[in-house]
Image (spheres, rainbow, N blue to C red):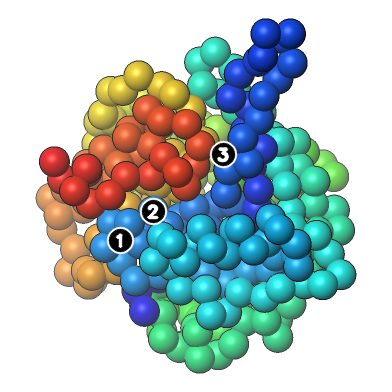
Amino acid sequence: MDIVTIGEVLIDLTQTGRDERGIPQFAANPGGAPANLAVAAAKLGAQTTFIGKVGEDAFGRYLTEVLQENKVDTRYMVTDADHPTTMAVVSVDASGERDFSFYRSANADVMLCKEDIPEEALKAAKIVHFGSVSLTADPARTATLDAAARAKKLGAIITYDPNYRANLWHSEEEAIAQMKAPLPLVDILKVSDEELPLLAGTADCESGTAQLAQNGIRLIFVTLGANGVFYRMGDKIGHVAGVPCKVGDTNGAGDTFFGAALSKLCKEDLNSLTADKLESILAFANKAASITTSRRGAIPAMPTLTEVEG
């Protein structure tokens, strides 16, 4: 198994427009950053497994089917009879930027437990990936950190996306503390230019990533939207330009970028990775993210390998 992702899969009720009376219209899109990443990587040639929890309801069944249709292994997904599938309402403005409202305080993804993440899944993985939404509350927080620590001991590469959603935390201070907690376990980190100041106290990519690298992180990517990505690999830093597109919806773009990058990096030896090779991988990931951005939805918008290479 190339990549195991752990965390939330949910329904994104994404605004698609307004009817003739001005009432907002929404589509029930599959989403959740770790699930998005699993699909993005699978569509680009990686073998991926998703571990998470859904409700015993129509949305839970739908999400499981979507992952399976996109060639993601769901054998370790758990159905919870007592808690409903998580939802997020995603409103999109004229420029394609998103605003999230979550319905998950007592929903299935938060109820993921340590016992739901078996050793055999972690042992089989080259990469184990998670995000910070799983860290907002227990039992999912403890389960996720425990799984990352176990996977690290088993020799997996640990990847992390501290995708900050302010309305999921009681305070920014709490968010920063919890988002920083896993950093000593992490081998590959992706942050947006908006999240870098939260973790590093500066918006400067060079000094901010240098500070984060002191945790032992081997590769750091700072996504810059339309401007591409800044990277740090040890003492080497660089920038790979973005791919211009007409924005339809930015939802899932970062997950597509990271999934695309990991679909290539899972086949590389990080100890011998060159800057030229890394920049080629990041150019591939930028193109994949651009295609997703040009469409609506997250998982439905993600490109195939043929589309990215074409």
* Residue that mark 1 sits on: 263
The image position of residue 71, as x and y in percent, is 39, 66
Q: Is residue 145 left or right of residue 286?
A: right
Which amino acid, mark 3?
Glu
Identify residue type, mark 1: Ser
Q: From the image, which quarter does the N terminus lie in?
A: bottom left
Determine whether the residue tagged by mark 1 lies in a helix, strand or loop: helix
Considering only order in the chain, which callout, 3 or 2, is on the residue closer to the N terminus? Answer: 2
Mark-to-mark CA distance, 2 and 1: 8 Å
Q: Nearer the viewer, residue 281 or 71?
A: 71
In the image, what residue type sits under mark 2? Ala
Counting residues from the start of the chain, the first of labels 2 and 1 encountered is 2
Where 294 sits versus 205, above or below? above
Q: CA distance from mark 2 to mark 3?
A: 22 Å
- Residue denoted by label 3: 195
Residue identifier under label 2: 40
Q: Position of residue 60 (x, y in %)?
A: 68, 61
> Vertical placement of 259 versus 208: above or below?
below
Q: Residues within 10 Å of mark 1 (few under 14, many from 20)?
A: many
Question: How many other residues sit within 10 Å of disc 2, few (<14), some (14-19) or many (≥20)?
Answer: many
Q: Residue 76 occupies which quadrant of the picture?
A: bottom right
Query: Is 92 located above or below residue 283 in the figure?
Result: above
Instruction: Please count the marks in the image.
Output: 3
Q: Are marks 2 and 1 in contact (CB under 8 Å)?
A: yes
SS class of the residue under badge 3?
Answer: loop
User: Which is nearer the eye, 232 or 17?
Assistant: 17
Q: Position of residue 227 (x, y in %)?
A: 34, 26
